[in-house]
Each structure stands twice: as structure tokens, then as C-alpha cells.
Amino acid sequence: MENLKIKKISSKVCIIGNLNIDLIIRNVPRLPEWGQEVLGDDYVIVSSGQSAYTAFALRNLGIETGIIGNVGDDLYGSKILGELNEKKIDTSQIETIKNGKTGISIAIARPDGERAFVSDTACLKDFNISLIDRHKDYIDKSDLVLMVGLFFLPGLKLQDARTILKHVRKIGKTTLLDTGWDPNNWQPHTLQELSGILHEVNIFIPNLDEACAITGLKDPEKAAAHLRNLGPHTVIIKLGAEGSYALNDTESIFTPPQKVKAFDAVGAGDVFNAGFIFSHLQNWPLKACMQFGNSTAALYISKPNDRFPPLIDVAEFAKRYHTYSYDL
């Protein structure tokens, strides 16, 4: 195995995106028909949104992280801010909407961990480019900017997202994008605007469902090639239980999953993003970044509580690929 040195990272990550509460009901065998009821046998209420999931995972890996976002002036908003502050995530760019409700998602998880969502964006409708502009100094001081959950931010126009990412690239910082799923099912005008956004993205990280919906292609290799032609230097497609796939101008890499028993996969893609970002900031080979991302996500889904894995656990678990060892 090739040895990789894990060095202390001084880089700062700025996450722009949604904060909300997830009510996760586990072990639901099927979705109910209208007028019916289906039982699960476990539930949790967690501070979430793609921003929070990614930030919690990054902080557990030792990366300085801050979020530009908003919450409601309610119990759930206080819960989110309290838990982010407890983990020493910078919340000074998170605005509280007076008399607003915090967004919520009800996540229904099957016994195999797969999930579906019903959501209310609530005060996330107030998230717009003016909010981001008020905290542009934080963007300018960051080394890497990750934008997530675009379609959970109905007040942020896609052309405004492009403007922000264009600014980030202009000042020489790395841009990453994970749009999340479009609840309006990827209308032609949305795809056209998204293709413009991708011109300003260094690394695009959709899951397979999103990549297929955007490109109309079911094969991850073909979908990644199509997406790369729209502008990103690197495309990472998260394949869930099948692992992940990466494509840039020199490499095409399929990385198999680390097999674990999944409690639920809610947030798994965001935790993969965190593992990948950590590795990218270490300047490791792309293959190592993929393996570390997979390993971070696998450990996360394997735990019902206290889910975000510490760096030492991920480094040990990633050795199971028998490709790299890690010198902490």
C-alpha cells in the first residue's frame, strides 16, 4: 500500500445552502397509498439540510467550516444553531428570520437504508442573493466554496447562484456544487440555466439519479462525460450502494463501496462530499479522494446515532481498500 501523509489543514471551507430539520422514520417497508398508514419502528429528529450534514462531517475531520444560510426564529432554528455552535462551526453568517419557521423534511427510510422525502422549505424562501452578498467577505476569506441544495432554496434564482460561483472562481477559489434533487422534475428551462452554472464549477458532485435526470443518460460514465462537456473540471457521481465514479481530463475511476449495514442513507451523499473535500485539500490522488469519501459515508450510514465519524476512524476504515495507508 502507498502511504499518504495526513497533514494539518489550515484551509477554510464555506458552505452556501440549506439548513433545516430532518424527521427521519426508519424501517418503513413501503410508502402508503392516500388514506392509508404504514408503520416504521424508529425515528430521529436531527439538525440537517445539506449544509449542516456536510459541515458536521467536515468538522469531525478537522476542517474549519462556516455556513452562509438562514433558519427560523423558532425552536428548530435554535436547535440547529446550538448544535452547529457546539461543534465549533462558524454560524456568524447564518441569519435568523424574525417570526419565520425553519424548513423541515420528513425522510422515510426503507429497511435497506434507501429514502424518500416530503419537505416544507418554510423560511428558506427568504434565502436569496442579497443574503449571500451580505456575507461575501466570508466567501472571499475561504479557500473552497461548496454550494448545496439549490432546489431547496426557492428564493435563490439559478442565475444568481451562477453569479456567486463566477465571483468565487474569479478570485481564484475552488468551487464545488451539489444541487440536490429538483422537486419540479428538471424542466427544460431549469436544465438550460443549470448548464450555465456548471461553467463556473470546478467539481460537480451529483448522485446518479440527479446525473441521469440532467443528462438523460442512465450510464454513469456517459452521464459524467456529458456533464464534463458543460464545464466542470471534475465530475463525481455518487452511486449509493454501488460506490462512486469520477471523471476528469486524465482519469476515469470507479470506486466500489465499503460494505456496511445501513440504518438509513439520509445525508450520506453530503458526508461523502465532506470526505472527498478533506482528501482534496490534502492534495491526494483522485482515487484516494474517492476511497476516503466512500469510507466516510459508509461509517456514517452504519451508525444509528452519533453518526459523523472522526478522522482516525475514517483513515483506519479506508485502509480496507488495500490501496493507501494513512500516516496521522
Image: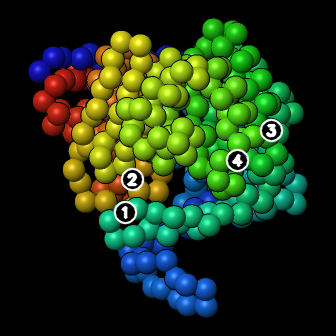
**Of labels 1 and 4, the one closer to you:** 4
Residue on which disc 4 sits? 187
Q: Amino acid at mark 2?
A: Arg
User: Disc 1 to disc 4, how far (Cα)?
Assistant: 29 Å
Residue on which disc 3 sits? 157
**Of labels 1 and 3, the one closer to you:** 3
Residue on which disc 2 sits? 307
User: Disc 1 to disc 3, how far (Cα)?
Assistant: 32 Å
Q: Residues within 10 Å of mark 1 (few under 14, many from 20)?
A: some
Identify the residue at image location x=80%, y=38%: 157
- Is residue 91 left or right of 262 when viewed as pictured? right
Which quarter of the rendered picture does the C terminus lie within? top left
Q: Amino acid at mark 4?
A: Gln
- Is residue 262 left or right of 32 when viewed as pictured? left
**Of labels 3 and 2, the one closer to you:** 3
Residue on which disc 1 sits? 113
Q: Residues within 10 Å of mark 4 (few under 14, many from 20)?
A: few
Q: Residues within 10 Å of mark 3 (few under 14, many from 20)?
A: some
Q: Could you say whether the residue bearing mark 3 is in a helix, strand or loop?
A: loop
**Of labels 4 and 3, the one closer to you:** 4
Quadrant assignment, res 67: top right
Q: Could you say whether the residue bearing mark 2 is in a helix, strand or loop?
A: loop
User: Disc 3 to disc 2, how far (Cα)?
Assistant: 33 Å
- Is residue 254 left or right of 90 when viewed as pictured? left
Judge whether residue 148 can be spotted in this image: yes
Residue 239, percent across and down? 37, 44
